[in-house]
Amino acid sequence: MNGHAKPLMGLPVDEIGAGEVMAVLTPIWRSNPVLAGRVRHRIGAVLKWAIANGHRMDNPVDAINEVLPKSNGQTKHHAALPHGDVAAAIAKVREADCWRPTKLAFEFIVLTAGRCAEITGATWAEIDLEAAVWTVPASRMKVKAEHRVPLSNRAVEVLGEARSLHDGDLVFPARKASQISSKEFERLRLQTGITATTHGFRSSFRDWSAEKSGASHQVMEQALAHTIPNKAEAAYARTDLLDQRRKLMQAWADYIAKCDLGDNRPERQHIIAN
């Protein structure tokens, strides 16, 4: 992100105008609207700080919203694998020449159908190995609500391997004991030739659960920590269906293990939006 805003870094903060901001955003506005939105937000935040501290009077980011090219309405999707190919991807990761906690974090992402930021920020204080439950705090959830994740037998084994490597607070630390960055997963993906993103494995899980598990729609959506769009329905949904989700996540882990032994895989591609 800093690389895209680099042309602004040498300028005095009071000399940055709408034209300079437009020159940064326009090249990426259509090709990567998510990134462009983040860059715009970051620039705007810096300029708001400058205003608050008396270094300028206006924020040019506010002035360019009407002149930026309109979005084409298309959502950028995450590449995903057919669920029968997930085991092969995990096998490639296990054999990769890579930082071991990163490989374990990758497998844990797949097994829990979690989001990358949820896993990389996981601490041992959130893990109850005896109950086989990982409680993700609201602060790290996209929906800003605490989420309990039932852990399959294999997920518990992954945690055991991670615990044997270090005794820090983070479950899957980077080399300098900080959080693993998304770039590390991207490098691992390129190294192994895996075409799916880490987020895309949520799609693989969702397709499998719909096609193979027999679980209800509500259980599948709870497993992915999706919110219920209907407010009236959400008001009555007081349980997180932990027991049902535990069976689902164990079945997912068992399915991956069976595919790893050579079961046939469907030859389909799937994509999922953010």
Image (cartoon, rainbow, N blue to C red):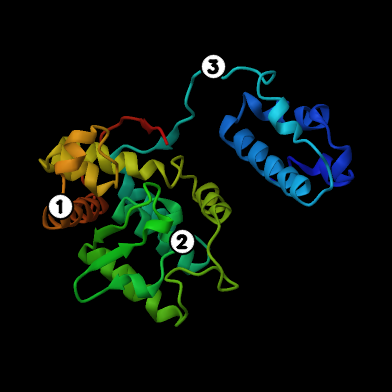
The residue under the point 80% across, 43% down is 6
Determine the image quadrant of residue 160: bottom left
Identity of the residue drawn at 10% across and 40% down: 214
Q: Which mark is residue 239?
A: 1
In the displayed structure, does residue 249 sit left or right of residue 270?
left
Lower position in the chain sequence, tag 2 or tag 1: 2
Asked if one can make out residue 123 in the rendered structure from this viewpoint, the answer is: yes
The answer to which of marks 3 and 2 sits earlier in the sequence is 3
Q: Looking at the picture, which amino acid does disc 1 mark?
A: Thr
Q: Amino acid at mark 3?
A: Asn
At mark 3, the secondary structure is loop
Disc 2 residue crowd, few under 14, some 14–19, many 20+, Cα 10 Å: many
Give the structural element (helix, strand or loop) at label 1: loop
Picture coordinates of residue 268 (x, y %)? 31, 30
Question: Between marks 2 and 1, how big is the CA–CA gap?
Answer: 27 Å
Residue linked to disc 2: 120
Q: Give the residue pinned by disc 3.
A: 72
Task: Determine contact: label 2, label 1, CB under 8 Å.
Answer: no
Q: Secondary structure at mark 2?
A: helix
Q: Is residue 84 visible?
A: no
Residue 260, how many percent across, how many down?
26, 53
At a point 27% along the width and 69% down the height, the residue shown is: 156
